[in-house]
């Protein structure tokens, strides 16, 4: 029987140091779904993504960045898809946050497109340019969520609603991590 590889484990010679990988993986798998609200779950996931962004924006070889990107792509999917299916879906039902929810969906679609292009890119220079643009897009997106959208959502939602969304988010994220 073949063992299923954890999508948060990059392969190849450019794999991240195991301690770094294990710390990031722990952030994605250690939460109790019944005791965390969606805001806390999103912020925790953002920490892991923000740890990777400088590695993609800064100095580094193609091989190193390809390895970091492999990890980021899996972590991003495990974060973004559940976020779309829970938090953004909720935002789009609220008149005062509908546009923000739609904007988030659009930014996620653009990031997905760039991730897919990067997976298929074999030209090293083109890869280096695209991966930097992806990192900058993610940095902007995370900053906007953390500084504007999440605080507004906290003000316009109850703790119970946030915990319910958090439980759904973590359940969906778990499914993305094991597929």
Image (cartoon, rainbow, N blue to C red):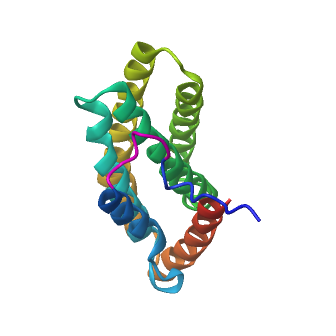
The correct choice, above or below, for 34 with respect to 116 in the image is below
Residue at the image position 54 percent from the left and 21 percent from the top: 121
Q: Quadrant of residue 72?
A: top left
Q: Nearer the viewer, residue 84 or 5?
A: 5
* Residue found farthest to the left: 59
Q: Residue 135, how many percent across, how many down?
A: 36, 34
Q: Residue at x 49, y 74 (%)?
A: 162
Percent x, y for residue 158? 46, 78
Residue 101 visible somewhere in the drawing: yes
Q: Which one is in front, 106 or 134? A: 134
**Region rendered in magenta:** 11-17
Q: Which quadrant: the C terminus?
A: bottom right
From what the image shows, is residue 99 above or below residue 4?
above
Q: Quadrant of the N terminus?
A: bottom right
Image coords of residue 26 (percent x, y) = 40, 69
Q: Main secondary structure of the magenta part?
A: loop
- Looking at the image, residue 28 sits to the left or right of residue 108; the answer is left
Who's the residue at 39% across and 30% down the image?
63
């Amino acid at each position: 029987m073949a063992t299923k590889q954890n999508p948060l484990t990059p392969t190849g010679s450019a794999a991240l140091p195991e301690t770094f990988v294990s710390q990031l993986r722990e952030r994605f798998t250690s939460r109790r779904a019944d005791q965390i609200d969606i805001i806390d779950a999103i912020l925790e996931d953002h920490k892991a993504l923000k740890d990777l962004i400088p590695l993609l924006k800064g100095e580094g070889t193609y091989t190193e960045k390809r390895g970091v990107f492999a990890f980021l792509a899996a972590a991003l999917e495990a974060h973004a898809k559940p976020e779309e299916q829970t938090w953004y879906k909720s935002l789009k039902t609220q008149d005062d946050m509908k546009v923000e929810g739609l904007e988030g969906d659009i930014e996620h679609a653009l990031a997905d497109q760039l991730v897919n292009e990067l997976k298929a890119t074999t030209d090293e220079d083109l890869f280096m340019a695209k991966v930097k643009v992806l990192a900058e897009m993610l940095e902007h997106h995370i900053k906007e969520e953390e500084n504007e959208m999440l605080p507004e959502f906290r003000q316009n939602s109850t703790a119970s609603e946030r915990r319910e969304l958090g439980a759904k988010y973590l359940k969906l994220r778990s499914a993305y991590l094991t597929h």
